[in-house]
Amino acid sequence: MGPTNGGILETPALDIETPGILQRVSEEGGGYTFARMAAAARDGDARAAEVAREMAWEQLHCGPWHSVLPIWRDAYSMACLHVAKHHFAGGDFSETIRVLDLGLIMGGTLLRVDLENAVDKVMAVLEERENGGNNGEGSDNGGGLLFSSADFNEAEVLRSLPAKSLSSKLVARRSGLSLEGFLRDYFLMGLPVIISDSMSHWPARARWNNMEYLKRVAGGRTVPVEVGKNYLCSEWKQELITFSQFLERIQSGNTCAAPTYLAQHPLFEQIKELRKDILVPDYSYAGGGELRSLNAWFGPAGTVTPLHHDPHHNLLAQVVGKKYVRLYAASLSEELYPHSETMLRNSSQVDLDDIDDNAFPNVRDLEFMDCILDEGDMLYIPPKWWHYVRSLTPSLSVSFWWSNPEGSP
């Protein structure tokens, strides 16, 4: 048996930045009480550390996210580090990881290196203890599959798709597409394409359908999820749960009225072990562009992303499961009735699963492309192309967004 506690978490960035953060949070954010609590936490007061974290949390949730003063995000990171250090010293590693993840998800960038290094240290301790308990014979067997093609009833699933699905123009499918061919025939032409057989070398293709593996490398990590039909619905909300809890909701079929979806989250910045399982495709450097974001889209069957468009080139890689995708050209934007609110201007008012013909009389006649993405497929979606996405099975996907260099056509 090892020691009952974890020792000390080193936080060099916190040690250097603390005076500046406390000064700024007092001057810019009016956080004089927070500064006193954080100073006491630095001196070893565990209760003061918790109070400081609660105070910073309130500041992060007192209005729209974009209106939060940046210093409060750094203040929240600071408080999370103090709280985590106390839990680690006491040997409560699960709570240590949870608090560090909250700092990574909600905090600023100033202390991110300390948060990431602390996560690495705690995970190493946990792995050492786990290996010590099973004589180093860890296994990824026995956890079951997230998705089995034997359970997929294609006829039943297709009946759930929007009207006219797969009856008109299918997205072109190319196997072994060269980068030159991608540039010439699709990127420069502004046309979508499915690229198959380009992900077989990803470790994720062999690992991510294994529940035991996913729980082992990420099960105790806290992640933000969306709960509800989709982000346009009034009952939609967000929760923070462990990755294991999220996987169990997916595996259970999420039969409740409010499916749980891990959507557009930079999961791979937070959980480095999963980042090692994927590779950035050469296609996402087309046009000399710069990779803007790499996001995870994990969820149960029936999860829907409503009709919307994005400003960047998008390569959607289907790792586990199947998805249906419908695409409308950017030139049809006005006919798709975008929301007028600033935050939702890239989303359509049209619900493709239940089209209101009186409000949107011409939508059913608009030309579109669609497809079913199978495991190992990548779908290129050009900028401003409208797309609707439905998970036909439990699904794990990764999106690569990139943009053209400044001034490039």
Image (cartoon, rainbow, N blue to C red):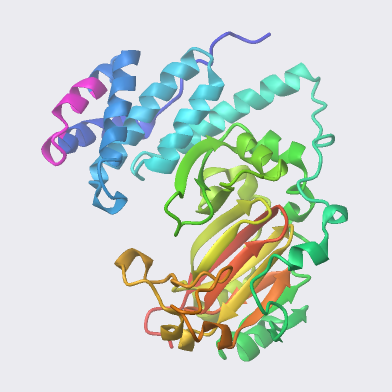
Residue 44 appears in the rendering: no
Q: Which quarter shows the N terminus? A: top right
Magenta region includes residue 31: yes
Q: Where is residue 109 in the image (x, y as percent from the top left)?
A: 36, 45
Q: Position of residue 375 (x, y in %)?
A: 76, 62
Q: Where is residue 214 in the image (x, y as percent from the top left)?
A: 70, 40
Q: Horizontally, is 276 left or right of 158 in the view?
A: left
Work out whether residue 144 or residue 11 is closer to the camera in this orientation and state it.
Answer: 144
Magenta span: helix, strand or loop, mainly? Answer: helix
- Front-most of residues 325 and 112: 325
Residue 282, by quadrant, is bottom right
Q: Of 94 and 184, which appears nearest the observer?
A: 94
Work out whether residue 288 can be spotted: yes
Q: Which quadrant of the figure contains the C terminus? A: bottom left
Q: Which residue is drawn at 26% across and 29% down?
A: 55
Q: Residue furthest front?
A: 358
Q: Which residue is drawn at 79% across and 24% down?
A: 136
Q: Is residue 386 above or below residue 242?
A: below
Residue positioned 55% across, 62% down in the render: 305
Q: Which residue is drawn at 34% across and 44% down?
A: 108
Q: Does the magenta stretch include residue 330?
A: no
Stretch of the chain drawn in magenta: 26-38
Can you name the residue that lies furthest to the right here?
150
**Looking at the image, residue 77 lies above or below residue 204:** above
x and y, in percent, of residue 315 in the image = 60, 70
Q: Which of 158 and 382 is in front in this view?
A: 158
